[in-house]
Amino acid sequence: RQYQYVGSGKVARIFLEVLACDNLPNMEAAHIFGNKTDAFVKIVYEDCICQTIIIDDKNSPRFLPWTKRAFVLHTNYPSSVINLGVFDYDPGLLNDHDYIGRAAVDVTNLRPGTEYMLNYSLFDTAMSNDRKHQGVIKIRIRVEIDDPRAYLLASLTMPPTIYVNSNTSKDFDCVHQACHGNYDLRKYSLGTIMMLLSELAGLGRVTYYVKDFVAGLFFWRSTSKFSIFGKKKISLPLNSICAFIMAIKLVEKPTLLPTFCFFSLGWLLTVAMRLRNAHPNPWRRSPTIRDLFLVLIFGKTRQLSSEKIEIGEGAEEAQRYSQEWADLITNAEKKAAEQAAEIAKEQEELYRELEEGGGANTEIASSFNGPNLTPMAVAKKYLYPIQQTMIIVC
């Protein structure tokens, strides 16, 4: 493997190899003559822009070890996302490369020193309910960190604003589509706003996890296990104990409310990390608070070590865990749909009564003679900033 070193970051190095793509759509106009997609992958990461070799006439291309497929990406900010865009190569200055699909790699879930072989589905856009599946890309990735303390402290800073340049408009289009997809989410559109609202509505499932946490808090469920002299383990409702002490102190000293509010933020993040590490699937776990604390104290002397995960480890338990939550959410959504249907029925009956009383068709609109302005144009001043904010949140 011959790696190409790109980027100016200093806190970490990401060893990335593009191995293959499967089931890509045939983008050639002359496919009736047997022509197939001439695929290549564009990689965009912070100030890095790189590209694999072009594989001619293959809808499932394989990037061989001696070809241009391996890159070392230098990291400035630990939470930066690797954008992968797959394109069909078209020669000439007037022909743009045909966009196929994109994928985003979140490196925060990767443990340093551990080599991952990952498959990502390709989609034509970054966020959309009806986005189209465009095949699969397979990569090999590994993160190397020389100074864990510097890496940890870098994640506490604000991400820098990075500007990248390209030589031609064709390359610029490829970079933009690799990052944002084929649909421009920053263009003012009611369809974009509704799509982002739907994306945010999908996050409503978090409320079920919050309800379960609150129930455990009130019923003093055991959340933490401690060992006594390295032998016997005891379980304690640590979250409930903490909440009980805070409630007592607030009753006695209400001026502590701002302090406890800020403390609760860190407490909730700690609880979320503990719940994540309690997942039966080892691939979903993250470094513990103990690991991060030791890195912060001892610096280079304490590395975030690699982890060996056996094939199929925790697969059955993770499947049962996911199925239990899926059943819980499905039942809750079913009840919510039944309640919504009852409310809609009541509203329909109310509307029927208004019609019978002659009040449903009362004209309350007014008209005026003025410039021909559409409602969307009038509302742009207020809706467009909201659209940009939702893009950041999603």
Image (spheres, grey):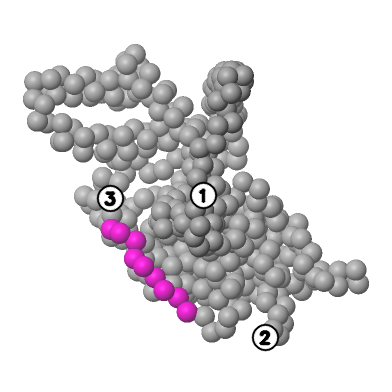
**Residue 171 can be seen in this image:** yes
Nearest to viewer (mark 3 / mark 2) = 2
Residue 66 highlighted magenta (yes or no): no
Query: Which part of the image, by quadrant, shows the N terminus?
Result: bottom right
Q: Position of residue 245 (x, y in %)?
A: 18, 21
Which residue is found at the position 73% from the left and 65% from the top? 61
Locate residue 91: give its quadrant.
bottom right
Q: Is residue 28 above or below residue 219?
A: below
- Left or right, 151 with respect to 358, comes to left
- The crowding category of the residue bearing disc 3, from other C-alpha atoms within 10 Å (few below 14, some 14 to 19, many at least 20), is many
Q: Which residues are magenta?
A: 157-165
Q: Position of residue 23 (x, y in %)?
A: 75, 57
Nearest to viewer (mark 1 / mark 2) = 1
Check whether the beta carbons of the residues at disc 1 and disc 3 lie within 8 A of each other. no
Q: Position of residue 2 (x, y in %)?
A: 57, 74
Amino acid type at mark 1? Ser
Residue 160 highlighted magenta (yes or no): yes
Residue beneath label 1, please? 367
Element on which disc 2 rests = loop
Locate residue 346: give its quadrant.
top right
Amino acid type at mark 3? Val
Residue beneath label 3, please? 295
- The crowding category of the residue bearing disc 2, from other C-alpha atoms within 10 Å (few below 14, some 14 to 19, many at least 20), is few
